[in-house]
Each structure stands twice: as C-alpha cells, then as structure tokens.
Image: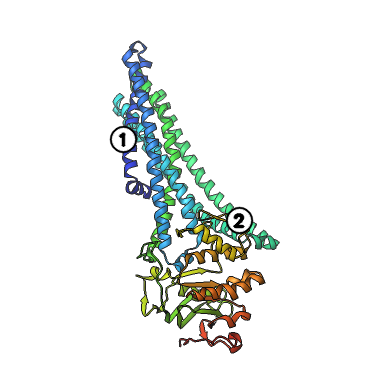
Amino acid sequence: MNLIRFLLLKCRGMVAVTALTALFSGVCNAGLIALINTIVNEPASLTRPLLLGFVALVAGKIVTGYFSQVWLIRFSQQAVSDLRGELVRKILAVPLRQLEELGAPRLMAALTEDVTSLTAALFGFPTLSVNTAILLGGSIYLGWLSWHLLLVMGLFILFGACFYRLFITSGFRSLHLAREAEDKLFALFRALTDGVKELKLHRDRRSAFLHQGLDATTGEFQRHTVAAETRFIFAHNWAHLLFYCLIGLILFLLPVYEQVNTKTMTGYVLTTLYLMGPLAGVMSSLSVFSRADLALRKVEALGMSLGARGRDRESAPAHSAAPSFVRLELAGVTHAYHREQCDDHFVLGPLNLTLHAGELVFLVGGNGGGKSTLAKIVTGLYPPETGEIRLDGRPVDDANRDDYRQLFSAVFADFFLFDSLLGLPTPDLDAHAAGYLAQLHLRHKVNVVDGRLSTTALSQGQRKRLALLTAYLEDRPCYVFDEWAADQDPLFKDIFYRQLLPELRNRGKTVLVITHDDRYFHLADRVLKLDYGQLVAAPAQETGPVRSALAVAPGR
C-alpha cells in the first residue's frame, strides 16, 4: 500500500511510537481479558493483588492511549504540513505554461481534498494500531487457552476474509470512480465562482450548468460513493456475522465434538465478544485508509507529473535586488499554442525585438494576435520554443531565467491581487504606500497598516490601481501593463497615459504597455504592432507626429 510506504518514509517517529504504545496496549488488554475470565470462573480467587493488577492494566491502557494521541498530533500534522509544502514548492517550480495545461481544479483538489483525506488517515492510525494490537493480544490469549481451537477458529476466519476481500476490492473500484467525479466537481465549483455573473445573466446557461453539469456530476459522485460505502458496510457486517457464527459454533457445536472445560468455554466467548469492538474499529478504518491511499496516489501522480515537467531554477536569494540592464533582445523567438476555436496551432514569431532601458513602448494589435503571450515571453514566464532572449548580450536560459524575471513588475489582464504587500520589507513601507495611494486616487478607499491592505473589495479599475501600487513599490527596472487602462474611468485613464507612464520613463524604467487606446499612441517612444503573430510596421497615423514609428526587424 502506498500509504504504508508514505508512513514509513515521512512518519517513522510516529510509526515507532504508535507501534510501541499499541503493543503495550495490546498486552494490557490481553491481561484484562485473562484477569476478568479468571475472576468470572473463580470468584473466590479475588484478592488484593488481582485488584491492583486490574487497576495497573487499566491505567496502562489509558496512559498509552493518551500518549499515542499526543504523539499523533505532533507527527501527523508535521507530515501533512511537509506534504503540502512539498507540493506547493513543486507547483511554484513548474513553468507557467505547463501549470496552465494541468489546470487549477486538479491542483486545488490535491491541496485540499486529498491532503484532508491523508490527515484523517493519519489521525486514525494510532486507533487502528491499538485495535490491531488488541486483536493480536486476544488471539494470543485464545491460543493459550486452546491452540487447536484457535487453529480451527483461524481457518474459519480465513474463509470469511476471502469473501471480505472481494467486497472491499469492489468498494475500492467505486471509490476510485468517486474520486474521479470529485475532480470534475472541483472544476464546476471553479466555474461557479468565476462565472457567476455570466450564469446570472443567462437563464438557459444557468439551467444547463445546474442540470447537465452540477447535478449530473454530483449524482455520479453520489452514486459511486454510495456504492463504495455500501460495500464497505456489507463487508463490516459480514465480519460481525463471522464472529456471531464463531460464538454459535463454540456454544452449540463444539461441546458435541469435544469436551471443553468451563474456563476455556467462557474465555473464548468473552474474548470473542470483547474483540468485536476492536474488529469493528479496524473495519471502519479500512474505508478511511482506502480514501487516503487513493488520495496519496493522486498526490504522488501529480507530484511526478510536476517533476517530469521541468523546474524553474531559483539561483539567487529571494531578497536579492533586481539587476539593471541597458538592452533586452529577442532573437528569432517563437512560441506555439493550440487554438480551440480553430482547432489548429498558432505560432507567435519568429520575433526580433530590442527594448532599451528608459524606453516607453506601446504594443498594439488585434485580439488573439499574441500580445499577452509576447508579454509573458518578454517577462520570462514562457521560455522561447526557438530563438533566445539576451540581456545586454548574455543569453537567458534555464539557469538564470528566475534571475531575469526579477527585472519585471507586471499587471496582466488576468492579474491576482494579494491582500498584503508580500515580499516588500522596505523601510517605511506603509508611508510609501500611502503616498502612492494618494497618487492613485485611492487614499479614501484603502489604507495600508503593517503592509496589509485594509480592503480589496473594490471595482475592477480600483483593484488594478492597487495592483499598480504593488508594482510601484517593487521598483523594478522594467514594467509591463497588459490592457491596464481598459477598466479605468476617462479621468484616470488620462492620468495613467499622460502622467504615470512618463514619470516611470523619466525614472529610467523600461515600460511595455499593451493597449488599444490609439489617442495616446503619440506619447510612446515606439509603437509595436503585432499582427497574427508577426511584428509589422505601425502605420504613421497610429504613432502620431511626435514619436518615431516601429523600430524593429520582423523575423522571416
């Protein structure tokens, strides 16, 4: 089982402590059974030593249970934290393009549902160990009473275990199908939260989403889950039936074939009845451990998938300052991706482009022409499939790509806004942020206290200004804005183009702006036009009389 291997690999301490406490607990339980059976059959033998023995055995069982639970909390939480942290680090190390191919629902299911299933199994491990030890101790006591009777009992149990295995295996298959349906549910939940506006606006779409999507997938998940649990419950009751049959055989059939003394008879009956509770606990644990084993396989498969997709190397300390540059070149760069609408591959490039320090460049072109993809290539989020990026003549490769990305601050069209200014431990951070908030006309909407934003519940345009605030505070050499002004009101759009962008250029920053606002094209040093994946000369009316036209050699 993958789960056993995981426990031995990640939780050796917990396994060792739990095994020892479980063993001691099993010994205590076996001693209690023997002591109770002795007193039941020989009431006159009740003495002070027996009473003290009873107290000691009960105390031993309670103490071992307490310490096993305490150690469990310590080791299991550490193991789960390590697993989650390892998975997050792998996700952060995988190139962006490949993460986009995996999809957010699969990643979220692994980080939430699968890790939760593993946590439940880890918490159940000590109980399973103790119950197993009790069953083992009880079996030893039964063997001491009559070994050949225990042998017959063992053969009977082996016969029942074969059928039990069939029921459990069938339940595992249904559980696997339920887990696959759960992945689909996570995708639908993501669609619900991200597309709630579109669902509210379109009644037929909303109805189809509910009935053909959510209800159908929920029904599939419910059907497989019920099937799995039904088989587990049947197997659980089958085990109980075996024990009752054993008791019936001992009481009614055994005396017919063999003379058994009263002590042995009562010992077998009492022990068998006593062991039904631990057996029920072991049976109940199987479904939990089955879910955990399946979840672990999912997590490991995702981890292997992430590991096989390459890694971004982080060669410099996280707090190192971003280097400056004079010239950034794209030489023969291409990037291809699949377009679902046309069922073909769109090729961006080959592109030959040079960006200079302290330059304000506008990137224009029609929708779907590859502007956002080009921005991701320029910032190092997508590595070129062919060609190379050069920084002051030095090629950017896997070894230094993470260093290269530290040149950029970007606000993409699908940006994410953190609720705190992470990774910006600059002196007087709150004061600097307050100054920029005033410049961005957000002083009366948002405050920054100890690096945390008071709110992010704003309009999309205002949220983009907060993203710009973060970019300002990062103070990187190069800025990229992807349709940043699209959600701004006319007043602040004018401020962005006529005041904020020139200020960044005057500070020596290189600024690449993806835009459709042709009335401001004349403010750029250059206008680059991307047409169906190729850089072409911008028409004169697009660049205006003040700034130069496109200065770029298109790839052929």
* Residue beneath disc 1: 20
Which numbered circle lies on residue 214?
2
Residue located farthest toward the top when viewing the structure as drawn: 44
Mark 1, Cα crowd under 10 Å, few <14 / some 14-19 / many 20+, is some
Q: Secondary structure at mark 2?
A: helix
Question: Does residue 343 appear in this view?
Answer: no
Question: Is 521 displayed left or right of 257 in the figure?
Answer: right
Q: Quadrant of the C terminus?
A: bottom left
For residue 325, which quarter of the picture?
A: bottom left
Q: Which residue is found at the position 36% from the left and 73% from the top?
A: 397
In the image, residue 375 above or below residue 118? below
Q: Position of residue 372 (x, y in %)?
A: 52, 74
Q: Amino acid at mark 1?
A: Leu
Mark 2, Cα crowd under 10 Å, few <14 / some 14-19 / many 20+, is some
In the image, residue 543 above or below residue 510? below
Between the C-alphas of marks 2 and 1, the distance is 48 Å
